[in-house]
């Protein structure tokens, strides 16, 4: 089961003038066979519409229907942000023949405050009307919008009706809208319509100054107590200091920066000892090596010793895992093609977040400060929406993190919106047809499973990799090839020309291309649990269910071995539940590194929770864990834990090398990118980032194996179990 999360963003104002009413929760107001004020969530084969025949109350309900496996639904953005502690959405659901998925109400509080659906209830099959509800904790100060809806994931049909929304038990219409006071930052309107910077001199000396300005601006943002307190619109302060320093000499610029820093106000200083268990130290050597005047250098060093509170207007740390959350970064949604000043701001915002809040800055592979200098001209010259989006994707690629990405309509169009119905994988250093996405359409191409793609539209594979590599974020080469396999045959044209090798014969052909929703995806993922033979059990983690584990392990307790397939993404976090069945005693399997708001950039390493419990009746069979380059994040984390079981071995190939919770960055133009937000290490503090999980027994698919529909990794694991 795939887990679908729907991300949308708000064009928001900062003051509430009159409370607006929540409407049409019973779907009685209809326009064009769809409930008014609601929006559709369109999947690859689904639809949503109103139904006057089947309803729980009133005259109308909403039907959500998927003819094939996918997702569809409806969504409604509440007109206000609300005061209170907890919000609850309830409603009635009826289902018909739902397979490969579930019916659900869902709710999301943006930006990244919380999300909940009913996947855990696994509502499928055919069921009569029944009332359900979901609740989330409110955080009005951090909330920009609240979105509610219904979703069908899988295949089948659901009805939803008679929704109600309450806050702390009161109907939402009786609850007061949250009146967020206009703070100092939001009351600063000087550059709301643009930075007033239309062109930037890119000669060598000015680029060097802009690099230093970016270093100082970001350092003050996270280290100066008065900036961290939200006393200044720090985005607009950048534009002010830029205008002030325009045309000034080096000495004059030093003085302008000194006066600027002094204008931020006084603060108390404090000399803290260097923390113990320091994994990565903040990179602040530039303060003394950049050629600043003595007065400016001393002033910056004084800021380093400032007494900082454990809070910052621009960043907070997740209360559980401590990865950074950037909640008060203005997305500037209308600036889809930002002016030169806002493009410079975008670069500074991203670069400094990575500088202070990326736990693997040291593993990027190059001096991150040189990347800042390199990208100043690139951002300034990114003069339209496409160039701006792509330069943001390019710098995100440079952190060498498989969690990094920029996905929007521009990148979608850049890589191509159409493709032939072929699944590509890199096997034996070749781009191989691994499967048909759609059996009927795939066979019509005349290409066979196991054929090797040599050229696409006249370009060989190495040339394509060279051209697209800077736009393919990945922690390692295998991850980059995995990303390329998804984009290799993408185009915006109705056909694509390929040269390929089939049974030793080189051929050429033109392939018809399709949009995502024009393909009938016939591939089926394995069941969660099956017996491969009488003595070997198989657990596929893409649809793992916590409530089934006890019965499964009771059934397989006397088997010779268990295969846990993590060449996918686990649908549930079940490390500790499975660990209790596999281990006889608790075992440490991980260490974390996190930072603090008082010492940004300093990363402290600490022990993680152990896996397993004291259990005399633990599983005694061999355990084979399967991984490959698609095993990322939670898959890698599960592997780290489960390989601690007695008689466990990991089979396959190098994983993606991006383990740890994801953090989100929003840049001007409401462009969102991501990165790994906490450090994950083996118990001996050896690396996982970029390296991934190293299998105990390396096994890679072969072209011959693909031709013969063999799973060679699974075969090797079963042979080991049987021996």
Image (cartoon, helix red, strand yellow):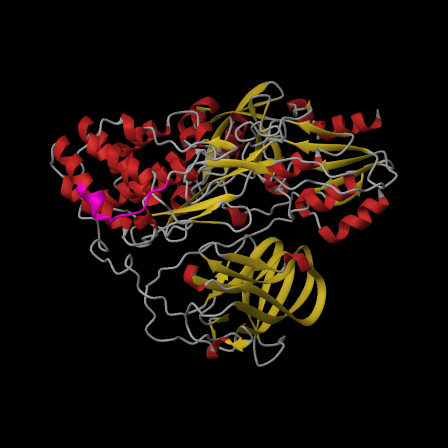
- Against 515, residue 647 (above or below) is above
Residue 311 in percent (x, y) is at 41, 51
Question: Which picture quadrant has residue 254?
Answer: top left
Report the residue at 17% width, 42% height from top.
Answer: 259
Report the residue at 53% width, 48% height from top.
Answer: 518
Which range of residues does the magenta coloring cover? 259-270
Residue 479 in percent (x, y) is at 53, 30
* Residue 293 in the figure: left or right of residue 580: left
**Closer to the camera in the image, 483 or 168:** 168
Question: Which picture quadrant has residue 340?
Answer: top left
Report the residue at 59% width, 31% height from top.
Answer: 655
Residue 443 is at least partly visible in this image:
no
Q: Residue furthest bottom?
A: 58
- Against 456, residue 195 (above or below) is below
Where's the C terminus, which quadrant? top right
Residue 567 in percent (x, y) is at 65, 36
- Against 19, residue 197 (above or below) is above
């Amino acid at each position: 089961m795939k887990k679908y999360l729907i991300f949308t963003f708000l064009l928001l104002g900062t003051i509430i003038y009159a409370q607006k009413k929540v409407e049409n929760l019973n779907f009685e107001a209809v326009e064009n066979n769809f409930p008014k004020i609601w929006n559709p969530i369109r999947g690859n084969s689904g639809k949503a519409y109103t139904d006057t025949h089947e309803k729980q109350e009133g005259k109308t309900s909403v039907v959500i229907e998927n003819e094939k496996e996918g997702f569809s639904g409806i969504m409604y953005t509440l007109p206000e942000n609300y005061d209170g502690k907890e919000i609850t959405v309830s409603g009635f659901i009826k289902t018909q023949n739902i397979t490969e998925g579930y019916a659900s109400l869902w709710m999301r509080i943006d930006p990244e405050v919380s999300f909940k659906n009913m996947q855990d209830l696994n509502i499928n099959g055919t069921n009569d009307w029944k009332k359900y509800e979901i609740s989330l904790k409110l955080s009005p100060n951090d909330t920009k919008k609240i979105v509610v809806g219904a979703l069908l994931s899988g295949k089948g049909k659901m009805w939803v009706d008679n929704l109600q929304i309450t806050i702390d038990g009161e109907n939402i219409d009786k609850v007061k809208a949250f009146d967020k006071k206009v703070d100092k930052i939001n009351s600063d309107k000087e550059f709301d319509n643009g930075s007033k910077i239309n062109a930037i001199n890119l000669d060598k000396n000015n680029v060097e100054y802009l690099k230093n300005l970016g270093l100082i601006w970001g350092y003050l943002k996270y280290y100066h107590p008065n900036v961290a307190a939200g006393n200044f619109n720090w985005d607009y302060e950048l534009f002010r200091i830029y205008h002030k320093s325009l045309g000034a000499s080096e000495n004059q610029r030093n003085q302008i920066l000194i006066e600027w820093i002094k204008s931020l106000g006084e603060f108390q200083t404090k000399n803290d000892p260097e923390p113990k268990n320091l994994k990565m130290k903040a990179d602040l050597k530039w303060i003394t090596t950049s050629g600043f005047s003595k007065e400016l250098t001393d002033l910056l060093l004084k800021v380093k010793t400032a007494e900082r509170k454990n809070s910052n207007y621009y960043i907070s740390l997740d209360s559980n895992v401590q990865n950074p959350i950037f909640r008060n970064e203005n997305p500037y949604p209308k600036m889809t093609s930002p002016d030169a000043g806002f493009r410079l701001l975008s670069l500074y915002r991203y670069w400094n977040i990575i500088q202070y809040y990326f736990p693997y800055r040291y593993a990027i592979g190059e001096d991150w400060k040189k990347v800042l200098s390199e990208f100043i001209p690139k951002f300034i010259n990114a003069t339209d929406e496409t160039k701006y989006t792509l330069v943001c994707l390019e710098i995100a690629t440079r952190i060498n993190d498989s969690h990094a990405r920029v996905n929007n309509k521009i990148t979608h169009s850049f890589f191509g919106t159409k493709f032939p119905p072929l699944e590509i994988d890199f096997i034996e250093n070749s781009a191989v047809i691994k499967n048909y996405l759609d059996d009927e359409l795939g066979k019509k191409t005349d290409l066979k499973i196991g054929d090797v793609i040599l050229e696409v539209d006249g370009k060989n594979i190495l040339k394509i990799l060279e051209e697209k590599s800077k736009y393919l974020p990945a922690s390692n080469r295998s991850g980059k090839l995995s990303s390329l396999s998804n984009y290799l045959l993408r185009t915006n044209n109705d056909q694509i020309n390929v040269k390929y090798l089939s049974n030793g014969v080189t051929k050429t052909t033109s392939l018809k291309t399709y949009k995502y929703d024009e393909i009938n995806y016939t591939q089926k993922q394995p069941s969660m649990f099956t017996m491969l033979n009488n003595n070997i059990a198989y657990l596929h983690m893409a649809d793992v269910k916590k409530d089934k584990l006890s019965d499964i392990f009771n059934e397989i307790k006397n088997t010779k071995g268990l295969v846990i397939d993590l060449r996918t993404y686990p649908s549930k976090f079940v490390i500790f539940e499975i660990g209790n069945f596999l281990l006889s005693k608790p075992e440490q399997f991980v260490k974390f590194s996190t930072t603090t708001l008082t010492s940004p950039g300093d990363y402290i390493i600490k022990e993680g929770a152990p896996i397993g419990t004291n259990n005399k009746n633990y599983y005694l069979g061999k355990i084979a864990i399967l991984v490959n380059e698609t095993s990322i994040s939670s898959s890698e984390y599960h592997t780290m834990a489960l390989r601690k079981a007695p008689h466990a071995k990991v089979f396959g190939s190098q994983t993606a090398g991006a383990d740890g919770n994801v953090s989100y960055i929003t840049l001007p133009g409401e462009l969102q990118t991501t990165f790994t937000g906490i450090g994950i290490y083996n118990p001996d503090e050896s690396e996982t980032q970029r390296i991934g999980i190293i299998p105990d027994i390396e096994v890679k698919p072969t072209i011959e194996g693909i031709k013969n529909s063999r799973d060679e990794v699974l075969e090797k694991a079963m042979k080991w179990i049987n021996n």
